Amino acid sequence: MKTVELTHTGEQVSQLALGCMLMGTATDEPSSVRMLDQFADAGGTFLDTANCYCWWNDRGSHGGHSEELLGHWFARTGRRDEVFLATKGTALVKDMDAVWAKGTPDWEVAYRSFDGAGADNLRRSIDDSLRRLQTDHIDLYYVHVDDQSTPLEETLEALAGIVQAGKARYIGWSNVRTWRLERIRQLCAQHGWPQPVAVQQQHSYLRRKAGLRHISIVDDEQLDYLQTHDDLTLVAYSPILKGIYDDPAKRDGHGMMASYAGPDADVRLKVVEEIAAEVDATPNQLVLAWLLHQTSPTIVPIIGPRTLEQYDAAMPALDVKLTGEQLARLDAAGA
């Protein structure tokens, strides 16, 4: 597997990241361990998780399953130093009774009760993550959900202390608006605090439909910002939108399509199918390959397979080669 530089840090990470969100819950431990072993054996180094993964699988849970499973894997294999480990804080749910009041998770309630990016919570959260992961440091520590109720100065100063203490090497932000990224960067420069080196957002080949306001999906303004500020790597989650590119029937009425459906998506899906056939790949693999070919900004897609079959279906994207003409057709497609 090829590597890319994480912004200008000199840190080389695998060009594809393995998302571990479902490990220990929807994906059982034997399957999770097999994926981790195969990914590492293939040269994969970038592992992504969070302290809240994944509370919504079991009522009464507060998360931590994925971090615990990774901790067991590190202890069993001794491969901690072979990987670049990212985890996140600030999105644990404080009031689980309210979230589960109707018998299923109410995400609107959950969003209103995240534990946030206060200094005390960040320090407590990373210590808890280190314990579950059975390690003494995190390579990349994200603010998982941007917390506009806490002063940025408080959050950034706490993160600077975490880095200074050696508990995290780099920081990043996720689910964040562009104006907030700029403010974060200004404050870090002003106070000499560590700058974020990565931003993790939902990003795929389809473009979000016009007029949609969505904090987590990259829009034209944010893409332009990241192209201009090349000291931020875009870590793209949900790059294949839960596999909708491969299956027109799955796309019909699928929740992931609500942010994308329309004439522009129809045109781009048609081109994906055409070029996938030309290179003998599935549409999902073609989209992953397109992301891997991007250089401005540098993009690291996260695959988050639930099953070994999904893992095996994603990995061939690493070998898909696209010509300049094919990339131009993909880029130009749209209503």
Image (tube, grey):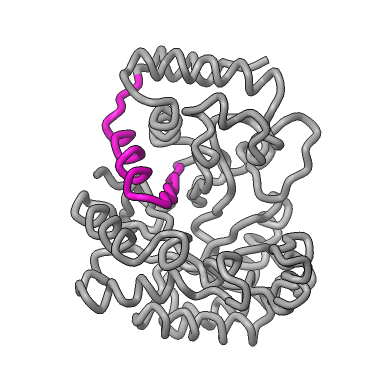
**Is 12 placed above or below 189 here?**
above
**Residue that protrudes farthest toward the front in the picture:** 103
Which residue occupies the foreground of this view, 40 or 97?
Answer: 97
Foreground pick, 26 / 290: 26
Q: Residue at x 55, y 53 (%)?
A: 200
Quadrant of the rendering where the N terminus is positioned: top left
Q: Tell me: residue 257, above or below residue 62.
A: above
| Residue at 47% across, 28% down | 246
Horizontal side, residue 101 vs residue 64: left or right: right
At 35% from the left and 21% from the top, the residue drawn is 322
Image coords of residue 230 (percent x, y): 50, 45
Tell me which residue sits at (77%, 66%) in the image: 102
Residue sitting nearer the eye, 164 or 142: 142
Q: Which residues are magenta?
A: 299-322
Quadrant of residue 204 within the rendered picture: top right
Q: Position of residue 162 (x, y in %)?
A: 51, 81
Q: Find out whether residue 316 is within the magenta segment.
A: yes
Q: Quadrant of residue 252?
A: top right
